Amino acid sequence: MVTLADFMEYKSGANAILVPDSHITTYSDLGNEVVRVSELLSGIEMLPKSAISIVLPNSLEFMVMFLAVVRYGAIAAPLNSAYTAEEFKFYMEDAEAQAVIVPFEEHAAKDAARELGIQVIEVRATKEGAMDLCFDEAPMTRLKDFSFPGEDDVALFLHTSGTTSRPKGVPLTHKNLITSLDNIGSTYHLTSDDVAMVVMPLFHVHGLIGVALSTLKTGGTIVVPPRFSASKFWLDQSAYGATWYSAVPTIHQILLARAEEDQAPAESFRFIRSCSSALAPSVFADLESRFGAPVLEAYGMTEASHQMSSNLLPPGLRQPGTVGQGTGVELGIMDEAGNFLELGGRAEVVIKGANVTKGYHKNHQANEESFVGEWFRTGDQGFLDEKGVLRLTGRLKELINRGGEKISPLEVDAALLRHPSVAEAVCFGVPDKKYGEVVQAAVVLSENVSTDAIRSFCSDYLSDFKIPDKIYVLDTLPRTATGKIQRRHIAAEFVPQVDDK
């Protein structure tokens, strides 16, 4: 398999996608529908190899439309359905999207597309699992020939937040993705007998690449509920015979907290995977003890098409508090001068592999800062032990990691400063037992206003998970001798005041 367009050559009567209480789709049916929809997409007037934004919840529609877009040779650019119109406008413009795929109902993404003059494609699945499509409110019927993509063509366009700029565009080629899928399949010995629960959103690399596509590439089955539901999780796991799932620690903790109430089985999955945020060793132990399955913590990021390292299935090495060994990806520890350190040396984690992006989209400065030859600087600090196992010790960048959601502090700062009564603002991450980190902020006011009113104001510009949980009002913001505001110093003032949640 060279590109994602070849996915649909795997045709069989085996189940590919199961949507609880809705659709059961075989590989053969999925393949036929992806081919049909990709031919319909070819009738849209747009520049070759352009981006198409996808704003859909976890669903059969998402999977069909994603695979159809990349088969057609366009670039799939999935977006969080919870974004505001302002956020949609930024992401669509940055990806240079020429069309957006949305549900039939009214949605902020449609408003953003109309403002930008971007073509709108509405989609819904029929009872039979076929896609009902409308292009600018007219049924899509036109067909024409098109060329399949090559391995070096961009297939996926995502964003990752930066600490010194707005979110950065990350183009990933078909080769990047296929390499990563092969690495994941090999790491966890995925086969056609596996059934994966998709609990993470498909607009993230974790859910899309780490679970859905890696399972489909190995001929397995994915169970795709519209959203994670702790109350239905074990019912679905039993009904469909799921063999594994992958999630952020927050979801693992929710399942543990409800285990007795939900009558979770003592023995469940072939393995449980954790990624996108650090898993506390105590949670690792509780998961293995209560659910009777090996827990494998992995390390991933968007720029690497998700997975870079992982702990291994028994009898392989599995250590709590670590993110395992490189999985088809070279790992190194590099100091600021670009020198590699010996085992045990602590500095920035760097990676190299065919899964790594060739560079950020139209961002020369970020590329200069992030690449040293073929090595990519992750922004994470860590060290490799004598067995080549990676232990992360902190983040060099100032991203706030709320339950796996990476949040740019400057984006939050900018929203706070839009409020007419906020003169100065700085946000920061503080430790939280449930989410790993949560967003808080400190502001200086020009006139009296409640912090609840400020938080409400931010909802016009930020998704809920980015809005500060708590806002502190100060007379002045502490600065360095050169006038700079340092987030870590301000955060240190308030960390002791943060209650465990």
Image: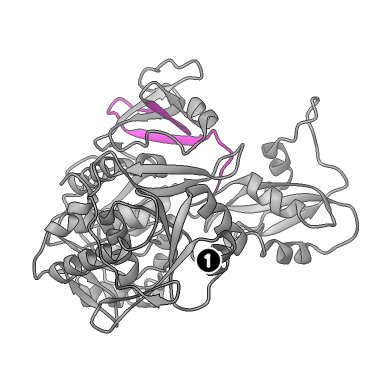
- The residue that appears at 20% across and 45% down in the rendered structure is 182
Across and down, in percent, residue 13 comes to: 9, 71
198 displayed left or right of 268: right
13 over 331 or under it: above or below: below
Q: Residue furthest right?
A: 447
336 displayed left or right of 410: left
Indicate the secondary structure of the residue bearing disc 1: helix
- The residue that appears at 23% across and 43% down in the rendered structure is 150
35 displayed left or right of 484: left
Q: Which residue is mark 1?
A: 109
Across and down, in percent, residue 454 comes to: 76, 62
Residue 331 in magenta stretch: no
Disc 1 crowd rating (10 Å Cα; few below 14, some 14-19, many 20+) is many
Question: Which quadrant would the C terminus be assigned to in this image?
Answer: bottom right
Of 8 and 483, nearer the camera is 8
Give the number of marks.
1
Across and down, in percent, residue 125 comes to: 32, 78
272 over 256 or under it: above or below: above
Of 48 and 159, nearer the camera is 48
Q: Amino acid at mark 1?
A: Ala
427 displayed left or right of 78: right
- The residue that appears at 57% across and 63% down in the rendered structure is 112
Residue 380 in magenta stretch: yes
> Does any portion of residue 268 appear in the rendered image?
no
Across and down, in percent, residue 308 comes to: 33, 39
Q: Quadrant of residue 345?
A: top left
335 over 12 or under it: above or below: above
Of 186 and 176, nearer the camera is 176
Q: Which residues are magenta?
A: 375-401
> Does any portion of residue 46 appear in the rendered image?
yes
357 over 93 or under it: above or below: above
Q: Quadrant of residue 55?
A: bottom left
